[in-house]
Image (cartoon, helix red, strand yellow):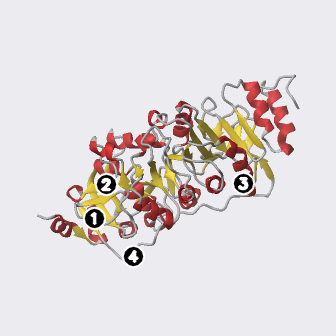
Amino acid sequence: MSIYEEYKRKLRTPEEAVRCVRDGDWIDYTLSQGQPVLLDAALAKRKGELKGVNCRGYFMFEPIQIVEQDPMQESFTYHSWYLSSYERKYWKNGWISHQPMYYRHQRYFYERGCCKVNVAMMCTSPMDDEGWFSLHFTSSTAKPVLDAADIVILEINEHLPHTHFIPERQAAGWEMTRIHISQVDYIVEGEHHPPIEILSPPPSPEEVKIAEFILPEIHDGAVLQLGVGGLPNILGEYLADSDISDLGCHTELITDAYLKLYRQGKLTGKRKELYPGRSLFAICAGSQELYDWVGSDPTIQCDNVNYINELSVIGQNSNVLAINGCISADLYGQVVSESAGTRQISGTGGQVDFVEGAMISPGGKSFLAMTSTHKDRDGNLCSNILPKFTGGDIVTTPRAAVHYIVTEQGMVDLRGRNTWERAELMISIAHPDFRDDLIRAAEKQGIWRKSNKR
């Protein structure tokens, strides 16, 4: 049987494909651009018919119909590994739950049986002439999910490219970026899928100032890991206009900031020790231009996040600079990046992976950036630097791992600092309106010396 005959034999309508779902099943949607919109809509129509069906996914930016149509979880309960802005609204309403993880560990949850998958359903690129479907921008975690599934359903999205893998890894048997027709149970085609552009907001004035503090720390040959938000974009613009050269990319998330660097000839990767001349990533989020570039340039290569975010892999490159955002920090140097009190904002993701990976890297540095203040619901100005965390805040990066913390007020290096020094440094980058209160709190907590500056 040819691959095309096999394809035709496995072709189903969305409604036919989701008939395989049974009461109590665990379903997996993978993430973001892999969101199976047609299958999700068809499955949601079975509300009231099914009972106790659980679904995992994360970082979704389109309505999830099994949530939208069943907010009271009569039939379906959705669990997110990492909340997008869209999923955050669901969480706020109590419609979904959150599953914490270090991103690099997610593969193990599926391989070691911690996460059962009865049915995996996701969007992939169209099949190529050899029978392969690319896992595109979901390669960070999709393959272990598909391998663990009893039934695999692929939904074809004509917008998704065939991304490029690391040849040396594939030759060694690590097939993490694609799946063959022989491994698929059902295939679904449908009407036009909308492009899934995930655009960052423009940088705030505070983020511009933070970027100005970080920029002098970036030098020729640095290997960049940039997180999400406006800060990476403004850094990309600054670097594109600078005289810094031969930057490299080894990142969990590849964004439009790297495209800006590439267009200005700054992103060459020539000085990387691990796969020089190539940019490695696990997930991709940004504009259609970014997707077109990643899909067409064979030097932009993706792999499972277990590999990309592995500390020993990150540390094979010298001068890794990891730049990520956070929400708040305390006087001990603990950093919160995923919650505000008990309110879940995002997830642990790979921040800790790159903070510690940069520490291993010769010449490596990590930066955790935030604004020094925020306004509460009543419009009151509040400090993002707190005396201590007592409101249920979830510490993402422990104080022992933190290197630089940056606000629009300044940048401090916490490596090797004792508790008294940390308190003084953290207060120095707090908003001036809150510094006296923080000093009094530090005195009460026993981490402020009489000789410390006021």
Splitting the image into 4 quarters, where does residue 377 fall? bottom right
Return the disc, 1 or 3, that comes first in the chain's sequence: 1
Return the disc, 2 or 4, that comes first in the chain's sequence: 2
Q: Considering depth in this image, is 396 or 260 the residue closer to the camera? A: 260
x%, y% of residue 400?
A: 61, 29
Amino acid under label 1? Met
Residue with the mark numbered 2: 178
- In the picture provided, is 45 more to the left or to the right than 69? left
- The local secondary structure at tag 4 comes to loop
Say whether residue 53 is visible. no
Q: Measuring 46% from the left and 62% from the top, which residue is drawn there?
A: 293
- Whole-number angstrom distance, CA of label 2 to CA of label 4: 22 Å
Q: Considering depth in this image, is 44 or 219 the residue closer to the camera? A: 219
Mark 2 packing: few (<14 Cα in 10 Å), some, or many (20+)?
many
x%, y% of residue 360?
A: 53, 30
* Circle on res. 192: 4
Return the disc, 4 or 3, that comes first in the chain's sequence: 4
Amino acid under label 3? Val
* Circle on res. 259: none
Q: Measuring 50% from the left and 62% from the top, which residue is drawn there?
A: 290
* Circle on res. 127: 1
- In the picture provided, is 220 more to the left or to the right than 35? right
Which quarter of the rendering shows the N terminus? bottom left
Which label lies toward us, 4 or 3?
3
Marks 1 & 3, CB-CB < 8 Å contact: no
Amino acid under label 2? Arg
* Circle on res. 208: 3
